[in-house]
């Protein structure tokens, strides 16, 4: 909640930001893209910090710092200042995704690791949903600044709760060389075809998913839909499909293997995107549900697979690289597809996302077929 609510809360009010500052959809989307860019650039340094000071202290420092900056950002006098603050906020937020899965993999036995990763991803969907459905209606009643501030205050409460109740780390101990060989660990992950294929899933699937949610609002407030902003923000309730599908994906992967579930989830994403091309609103809503369920199922599989197949001793770095690709895709592709919206309309955005999903599926089939059940390399 504390991480993902504030990370994505501006996504629900991008049309209002674009209107106030008289900027294009792609420029307004920088409120999301620069935050995720800051996060992407910070995950490796945060993994280093976690090796030095411990998993929980690093996560706690990051989330409390991010929440403080998020509150201050809502008082920014100009768009430029707001975007700079969002970048800094994202850099602080990088602590959680950089470390959380490594923390879980060290604290939970291997037989439950897939299910636990799915449960964690389900939590991220609840956080992301909360940020959007609070910011949207509050912004419609007051202003987009008040909407984003309301989310930041909720995140402050959540961050304080996390700092108080998170169980102490027992699987991590100092003095075993965690601070040595950071570059070696990063390079070992980058030399692994399995890891690179998983990073490609993160970059392509996340980039496409965020682009859909960034720009569909601009379509839905225009004819023939003409939805008011508060009603448009309720579409983010589709995120609930992700909170269901991600733990289910973990359970299915435990039974059938990760790759079949990953490919099936990506196919669901493609089907969902195609349904959003309809001019009938109920069908668009079904498409969002299918897309969201498919994405979070795929993300649960790929993100949990990454530390499980990481080179020995490099779980934190492998997870950090996964999230570097994940939020790099969100930042770059989530911004670039705004130009497709302006030049080609919604079919241009949807077609681009379908192509990215197909590329991700092809990479998975080529490089992950033999990865099921392989032990970690030394």
Image (tube, rainbow, N blue to C red):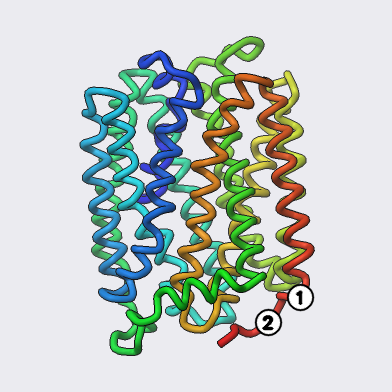
Residue 71, given in percent of the width and then of the height, sits at 23, 38
- In the displayed structure image, the side of residue 90 where residue 360 appears, left or right: right
Residue found at x 33% / y 33%: 83
- In the displayed structure image, the side of residue 337 where residue 273 appears, left or right: right
Q: Which residue is mark 1?
A: 370
Residue 305, given in percent of the width and then of the height, sits at 60, 69
Q: Which residue is mark 2?
A: 374
157 and 300: which is toward the camera: 300
- In the displayed structure image, the side of residue 368 where residue 152 appears, left or right: left
Residue 91, given in percent of the width and then of the height, sits at 33, 51
Q: Secondary structure at mark 2?
A: loop
Residue found at x 46% / y 64%: 320
The quarter of the rendered structure image containing the C terminus is bottom right
* Image quarter of residue 369: bottom right
Residue 138, given in percent of the width and then of the height, sits at 35, 25
Q: How far is disc 1 from disc 2 in space, using C-alphas? A: 8 Å
Q: Secondary structure at mark 1?
A: loop
Neighbours of disc 1 within 10 Å: few (<14), some (14-19), many (20+): few
* Image quarter of residue 34: top left
* Total residue callouts: 2
Q: Is residue 137 above or below residue 203?
A: above
* Image quarter of residue 356: top right
- In the displayed structure image, the side of residue 104 where residue 368 appears, left or right: right
Q: Contact (CB < 8 A) between labels 1 and 2?
A: yes
Residue found at x 59% / y 83%: 376
Residue found at x 64% / y 56%: 201
């Amino acid at each position: 909640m504390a991480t993902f609510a504030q990370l994505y809360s501006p996504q629900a009010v991008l049309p209002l930001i674009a209107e106030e500052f008289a900027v294009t959809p792609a420029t307004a989307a920088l409120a999301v893209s620069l935050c995720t860019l800051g996060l992407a650039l910070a995950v490796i340094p945060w993994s280093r910090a976690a090796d030095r000071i411990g998993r929980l202290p690093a996560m706690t420092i990051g989330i409390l710092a991010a929440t403080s900056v998020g509150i201050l950002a809502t008082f920014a006098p100009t768009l430029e200042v707001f975007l700079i603050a969002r970048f800094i906020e994202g850099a602080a937020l990088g602590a959680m995704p950089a470390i959380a899965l490594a923390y879980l993999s060290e604290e939970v036995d291997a037989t439950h690791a897939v299910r636990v990763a799915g449960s964690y991803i389900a939590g991220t969907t609840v956080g992301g949903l909360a940020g959007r459905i609070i910011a949207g209606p509050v912004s419609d009643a007051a202003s987009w600044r008040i909407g984003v501030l309301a989310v930041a205050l909720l995140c402050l409460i959540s961050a304080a709760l996390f700092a108080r109740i998170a169980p102490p780390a027992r699987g991590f101990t100092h003095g075993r060389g965690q601070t040595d060989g950071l570059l070696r660990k990063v390079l070992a992950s980058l030399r692994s075809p399995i890891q690179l294929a998983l990073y490609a899933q993160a970059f392509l699937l996340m980039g496409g998913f965020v682009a859909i949610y960034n720009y569909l609002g601009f379509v839905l407030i225009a004819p023939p839909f003409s939805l008011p902003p508060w009603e448009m923000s309720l579409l983010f309730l589709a995120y609930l499909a992700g909170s269901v599908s991600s733990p289910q994906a973990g359970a299915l992967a435990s039974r059938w293997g990760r790759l079949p579930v990953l490919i099936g989830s990506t196919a669901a994403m493609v089907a969902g995107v195609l349904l959003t091309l309809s001019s009938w609103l109920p069908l668009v809503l079904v498409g969002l549900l299918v897309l969201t369920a498919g994405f979070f199922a795929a993300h649960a599989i790929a993100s949990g697979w990454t530390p499980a197949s990481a080179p020995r001793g490099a779980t934190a770095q492998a997870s950090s690289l996964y999230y570097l690709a994940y939020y790099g895709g969100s930042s770059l592709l989530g911004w670039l597809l705004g130009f497709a919206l302006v030049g080609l309309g919604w079919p241009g955005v949807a077609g681009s996302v379908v192509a990215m999903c197909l590329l991700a599926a092809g990479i998975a089939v080529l490089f992950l077929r033999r990865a099921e059940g392989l032990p970690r390399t030394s």
